[in-house]
């Protein structure tokens, strides 16, 4: 399966640079920062949590959209994600994203040996998935309803297809090797998002809580369902951010995982995803996010990987978004 | 080892958020005082009207407005909503915008012009936000009718 081309980040970086230097006159009528950024599955949100906000800078009379590129660097694996979304009348969001996890040779080499494959057969192992998403705002407004506690509420769906569930040769299908049951799955979520203007000592506070029904392992990169649990479970996700000014947000996120895999040599224990983020909107058309994220040890359950240190779970998350 | 991890991360997150909330007592004065009372409010709103006049997105709404009268009404209203000793005697927000068909993007354009004016007049960001929070619910009576 094709990986996200190496030229993608370069092109994206060039686009962002040009947009920062322009005034992005085609941006829609929404206030800066109130479209959020793009989470790793392609939906408008934080870094790893979909919010009730609709993608783009459009108002209810306009059509908007976003494009994003995200790179996470862990010590045992990297994740790249890229995608596009369209926001229709600040009501309906349609999105597409592609994620690729690249597993380091330090992880695959022992598996390679255990399976008695020719040396280096599993080098450069990757797993990719495609995600098609839809989200609809059903109530409230995150920004204007400042005289009540009513949040903006949206419901969404993310249909995910893992392209590397099993390989042609039957040896590098990481999700199936780990015990995942399905190559595709569909998540359903409801998100509650509110900006409390001036609430945090005069600064604006953005809060999101999201409830998700899912059977995805590591958001689908390791397939769907597993030996311990195959059906849907309810997962909780949340983000909190403080606007230091209209252009800059700092905050934290948390997202639980189903943990469908069995323990043991070929098991991998999912850990909750967490991050501390800094998002910067130089203008309405550009959003840049830098985060320190912990997405867990997910490919490390393969084979006989040595004990994982805390540091190995953490990595830098960089994301860029262009909006109209 | 992994059990402690979420707890630690949450603690760090809580500390980061706490550190970002300015460490000072709850505002001593009302928003009216923090805006510089009537003189400060007047400067901000007169400058805002100036920015609106140059704002091609929305200046057509004010093409036939009596500007001194408009400025007076805006000052009275902001003085009133910020807790100052003023009474707003103009029309209701709904009635004042009847038939203008103001859209969300127009409303936000005015908010941006207000922000520009507040920055120009060195209104601190927390004070800016408190005024915007007080004015945000006006979105409903002002727009789409």
Image (tube, coloured by chain):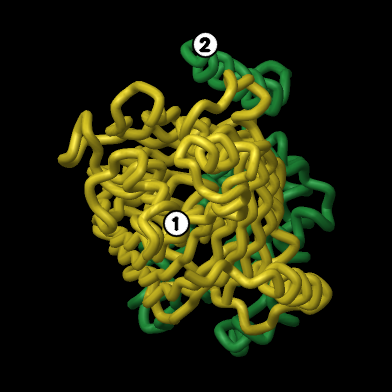
Chain colours: A yellow, B green
The residue that mark 2 highlights is B4
Quarter placement of the C terminus of chain B = bottom left
> Image height check: is A212 above or below A13?
above
Residue A41's tag is 1
- Residue sitting nearer the eye, B11 or B111: B11
Taking depth in this image into account, of A50 and B124 the one nearest to the observer is: A50
Dot 2 crowding, Cα within 10 Å, few <14, some 14–19, many 20+ = few
* Residue A171 picture location, percent across and down: 41, 52
Residue closer to the observer: A298 or A22: A298
Q: How many labels does the image show?
A: 2
Label 2, label 1: how far apart the Cα atoms are: 27 Å
The location of residue A200, given as percent across then percent down, is 59, 31
Same chain for the residues at labels 2 and 1, yes or no?
no
Q: Do the residues labelled 2 and 1 touch (CB within 8 Å)?
A: no
The x, y position of residue B144, in whole percent, is 36, 75
Q: Residues within 10 Å of mark 1 (few under 14, many from 20)?
A: many
Describe residue A84's horizontal placement relative to residue A52 as left or right.
Answer: right
Residue at screen point 57% across, 32% down: A294
Q: Residue at x 35, y 56 (%)?
A: A165
Report whether residue A44 is seen.
no
Secondary structure beneath dot 2 equals helix
Instruction: Name the residue at 61% across, 55% down.
Output: A124
Chain letter of the residue carrying label 1: A
């Amino acid at each position: 399966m094709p990986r996200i081309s190496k030229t993608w980040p370069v092109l994206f970086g060039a686009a962002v640079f040009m947009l920062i230097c322009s005034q992005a006159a085609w941006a829609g009528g929404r206030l800066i920062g109130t479209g959020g950024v793009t989470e790793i599955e392609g939906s408008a949100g934080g870094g790893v949590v979909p919010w009730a906000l609709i993608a783009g800078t459009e108002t209810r009379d306009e059509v908007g959209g976003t494009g994003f590129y995200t790179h996470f660097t862990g010590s045992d694996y990297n994740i790249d994600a890229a995608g596009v979304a369209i926001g229709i009348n600040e009501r309906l969001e349609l999105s597409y994203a592609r994620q690729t996890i690249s597993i380091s040779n330090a992880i695959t080499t022992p598996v390679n040996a255990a399976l008695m494959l020719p040396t280096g057969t599993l080098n450069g192992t990757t797993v990719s998935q495609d995600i098609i998403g839809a989200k609809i705002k059903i109530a409230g407004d995150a920004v204007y309803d400042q005289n009540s506690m009513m949040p903006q509420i949206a419901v969404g769906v993310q249909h995910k297809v893992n392209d590397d569930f099993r390989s042609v040769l039957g040896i590098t299908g990481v999700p199936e090797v780990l015990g995942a049951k399905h190559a595709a799955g569909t998540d359903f979520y409801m998100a509650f998002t509110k900006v409390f203007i001036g609430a945090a000592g005069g600064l604006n506070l953005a809060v999101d809580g999201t409830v998700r029904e899912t059977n995805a392992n590591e958001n689908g990169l390791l397939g769907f369902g597993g030996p311990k649990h195959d059906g849907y479970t309810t997962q909780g996700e949340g983000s909190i951010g403080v606007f230091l000014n209209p252009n800059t947000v700092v905050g934290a996120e948390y997202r639980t995982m189903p943990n469908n895999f069995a323990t043991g040599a070929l098991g991998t224990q999912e850990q909750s995803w967490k991050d501390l983020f800094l998002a910067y909107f130089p203008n309405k058309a550009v959003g840049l996010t830098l985060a320190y994220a912990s997405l867990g040890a997910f490919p490390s359950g393969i084979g006989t990987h040595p004990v994982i240190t805390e540091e190995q779970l953490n990595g830098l998350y960089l994301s860029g978004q262009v909006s109209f | 080892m992994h059990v402690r991890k979420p707890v630690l991360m949450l603690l760090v997150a809580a500390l980061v958020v706490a550190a970002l909330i300015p460490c000072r007592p709850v505002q001593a004065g009302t928003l009216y005082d923090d805006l510089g009372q009537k003189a400060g409010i007047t400067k901000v709103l007169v400058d805002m009207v100036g920015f609106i006049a140059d704002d091609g997105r929305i200046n057509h709404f004010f093409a036939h407005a009596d500007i001194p009268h408009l400025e007076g009404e805006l000052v009275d209203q902001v003085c009133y909503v910020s807790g100052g000793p003023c009474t707003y005697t103009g029309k209701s927000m709904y009635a004042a915008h009847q038939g203008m068909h103001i859209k969300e993007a127009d409303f936000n354009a005015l908010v941006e012009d207000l922000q520009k004016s507040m920055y120009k007049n060195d209104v601190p960001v927390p004070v800016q936000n408190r005024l915007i929070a007080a004015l945000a619910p006006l979105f409903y009576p002002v727009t789409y009718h």
